[in-house]
Amino acid sequence: MNKPRNHQPRLIRWMLLFLAIGLMGLAESGSIAAAQSTSSKDAPTSNWGKPQDPNQAEPFWGEHQGGIATKPQHFMYFAAFDLTANSREDVIKLLKAWTAAAARMSEGETAQPLESGLKLAVTPAAPKGGDADETPDTGPRAADTGEVLGMPPSRLTITFGFGAGLFLIDGKDRFGLAARRPEALVDMPNFGSIDQMVKEHTGGDLAIQVCAEDPQVAFHAVRQLARIAEGVAQIRWVQTGYRPIAGDRHLLGFSAEEKTPGMNAPQAQAIWAGKEGQDWMRGGSYVVVRRIRFALEHWDQMPQAYQESAVGEMKHPSKPVGQVQTNGKSSSDNVVTEDNTPPHLAIVIPGRDAMLRRSYSYNDGVNFTTERWPPWRQGLEYDAGMFFVCFQRDPRTGFIAVFRELASHDSRLNQFWTHVGGGLFAVPPGAKQGEYIGQGLFESH
């Protein structure tokens, strides 16, 4: 007859294991508490790293709009809008309402005072016809949808931009602003085979970039602004994005090319618009956004040596990218392509001070795709890549100049990505309390 097992040693081992886990949790919570007690002045300036204190509120009012030189948050929601109203006064009302709501939400408040009810930029007409019981209530709606009530500000920033359609669309100057269109707000050129821009995911009259340390806080802000815009503007396209909580790599597995801690002096000179253009844009900037789909299935089948030569860096998962050296040279100095084509970073680095990159990865599941390079595979593939975001004083000398070089010479990497959407928007300067975003455009002549 078998003797009964003695479970005491196993029980002791489990108790020790849970005790160790508990101690680790206490240590981690202590480090988090210490990090949260650090003031924003003493916070690390690296573009990457753990989320900042979610209780922190980023300033809304100021010389420049937030979300540009602000330390990047870890979640982003970008929305482009088409204007449906034809009245200049309606657009001004919308911008005033958006400014007030953005300022409140940046402080962790509801978009509008809860006791006031939702104030739309333009009151929609009551529905016509139908039985009385089927007619929706046309009274005041809730001032806020409520999904972030009780939540902290999460470093929320809301950045507004103006597209070319605000000034002229189909040859029509519908708001009397055509003469005020900045020269730098150009029509984006085509960059050849890497461009397969989808109309429904490109352009827009107005744009909103919302960033936060919590994705629900970011979505809530866009949701409220879209509600306020009813009758004046409607969403044309949206894109969500994220940054890794720790690390600095994009979905190709390499550095995100953002090693500069914050914004350096050359970038500061290249970001803010000056006296060279329209007066209402001084202190503003221009943002280029591009939805860039990565052919990850194709990329994942490539030898690591090819990936390294295409990017221009060594791929060492156990070591930080950019710190690997051989014979006293940096990793990018040791990469030589077999066909003498320059690696990606050799093309990008010379122009990186002409713009400030603030990009995010995205993953929108899968869809049916036909690859545009051999082996010409088709089927369900990841719809994932990079939502490229960059701010500059003039996109003609910033993004456009750099990407012309990439389109022409980055042949080893171009087969793995396709630009499928995006836009160019003029980002006016910040506003003082009592003003609204873009006020100089409408009221200064």
Image (cartoon, rainbow, N blue to C red):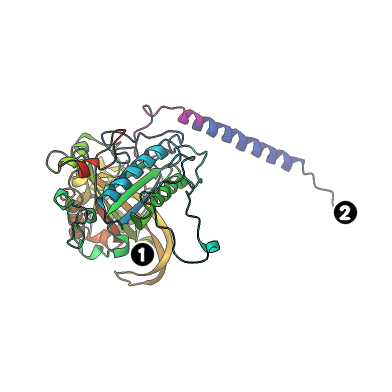
Where is 130 relative to 62, above or below? below
Q: Is residue 303 visible?
A: yes
Q: Specify whether 435 is left or right of 26.
A: left
Could you tell me how far apart the alpha carbons at marks 2 and 1 are, in whole angstroms?
61 Å
Question: Mark on residue 208?
Answer: none
Q: Position of residue 181 (x, y in %)?
A: 17, 50
- Magenta segment main secondary structure: loop
Q: Position of residue 143 (x, y in %)?
A: 46, 45
Q: Specify whether 361 is left or right of 287.
A: right
- Label 1 element class: helix
| Residue count near mark 1 (Cα–Cα under 10 Å), binned few <14, some 14–19, many ≥20 | some
Which residue carries the number 2 mark?
Answer: 1
Which of the 4 image quadrants contains residue 264?
top left
Which residue carries the number 1 mark?
Answer: 298
Q: How many marks?
A: 2
Q: Residue furthest right?
A: 1
Where is 411 relative to 182, above or below? below
Front residue of this view, candidates 16 and 411: 411
Q: Position of residue 386 (x, y in %)?
A: 34, 54
Q: Position of residue 395 (x, y in %)?
A: 19, 49
- Label 2 element class: loop
Q: Earlier in the sequence, mark 2 or mark 1?
A: 2
Q: Residue at x 69, y 38 (%)?
A: 15
Where is 316 relative to 421, above or below? above
Stretch in magenta: 33-50
User: Are the residues flagged by discs 2 and 1 in contact, CB closer than 8 Å?
Assistant: no
What residue type is disc 1 on? His
| Residue count near mark 2 (Cα–Cα under 10 Å), binned few <14, some 14–19, many ≥20 | few
